[in-house]
């Protein structure tokens, strides 16, 4: 048997032997592979794969250059799976309206480095590059941004901090509940 045929046969046997384990892994919904730093934020997202929708949005709205040019950003990056869970008509509407897409994406950026130590144990709003606010919540065991779970935090690139989120951020979602003092009647 030639070395090539031997390797092909060995690969086929290995694939068949691991098939039951692959099925079990799919049933268990394995976590996404950890994102590793590979340059700046845009390069890191492109080279790690799984962020094509987010990066394509940044590219189509001319925001990739802005992100690359900044030195102290925080970006909440939804994966392709996160965008797949978004209603298709909402995503199609964003893709057809560049101004809306740009504002939507700018909501995922904070013009300051915000690592998990600033989120843990706290709950509060932070201004985004879009001019609105994102609610960061570390008051429980799971870190959140506008209700999205931060699946991987503190990916420190040459131009800031990336946090991978499990769904796209939507302004106003996860807004803080009114406090009792705000609900109380005021005395005149």
Image (cartoon, rainbow, N blue to C red):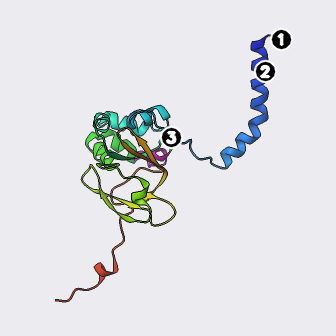
Q: Earlier in the sequence, mark 1 or mark 2?
A: 1
Q: Earlier in the sequence, mark 3 or mark 2?
A: 2
Whether residue 150 is visible: yes
Question: Residue 9 at x, y = what percent?
Answer: 78, 21
Quadrant of image for the C terminus: bottom left
Q: In the picture shown, does residue 182 fall above or below 127?
A: below
The part of the chain drawn in magenta is 82-89
> Is there CB contact under 8 Å for labels 1 and 2?
yes
- What whole-number distance in Å separates the C-alpha atoms at marks 3 and 2? 33 Å
Residue tagged 1: 1
Residue tagged 2: 9
Q: Earlier in the sequence, mark 3 or mark 1?
A: 1
Mark 1, Cα crowd under 10 Å, few <14 / some 14-19 / many 20+, is few
Question: Residue 39 at x, y = what percent?
Answer: 41, 33
- What whole-number distance in Å separates the C-alpha atoms at marks 1 and 2? 10 Å
> Is there CB contact under 8 Å for labels 3 and 2?
no
Q: Residue at x 29, y 33 (%)?
A: 65
Question: Residue 185 at x, y = what percent?
Answer: 25, 86
Q: In the picture shown, does residue 67 fall above or below 119?
A: above
Magenta region includes residue 102: no
Q: Secondary structure at mark 3?
A: loop
Q: Residue at x 79, y 10 (%)?
A: 2
Residue tagged 3: 35
Q: Secondary structure at mark 1?
A: loop
Whether residue 146 is visible: no
Mark 3, Cα crowd under 10 Å, few <14 / some 14-19 / many 20+, is some
């Amino acid at each position: 048997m030639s070395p090539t045929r031997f390797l092909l046969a060995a690969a086929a046997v290995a694939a068949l032997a691991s098939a039951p384990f692959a099925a079990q892994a799919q049933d268990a919904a394995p976590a996404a592979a950890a994102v590793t730093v590979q340059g700046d934020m845009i390069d890191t997202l492109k080279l790690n794969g799984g962020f094509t929708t987010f990066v394509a949005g940044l590219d189509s709205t001319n925001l990739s250059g802005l992100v690359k040019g900044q030195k102290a950003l925080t970006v909440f990056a939804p994966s392709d799976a996160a965008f797949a869970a978004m209603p298709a008509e909402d995503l199609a509407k964003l893709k057809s309206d560049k101004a809306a897409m740009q504002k939507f994406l700018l909501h995922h950026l904070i013009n300051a480095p915000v690592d998990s130590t600033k989120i843990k144990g706290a709950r509060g709003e932070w201004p985004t590059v879009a001019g609105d606010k994102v609610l960061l919540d570390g008051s429980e065991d799971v870190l959140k941004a506008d209700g999205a779970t931060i699946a991987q935090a503190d990916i420190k690139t040459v131009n800031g901090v990336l946090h991978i989120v499990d769904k796209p951020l939507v302004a106003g979602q996860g807004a803080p509940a009114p406090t009792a003092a705000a609900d109380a009647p005021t005395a005149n």
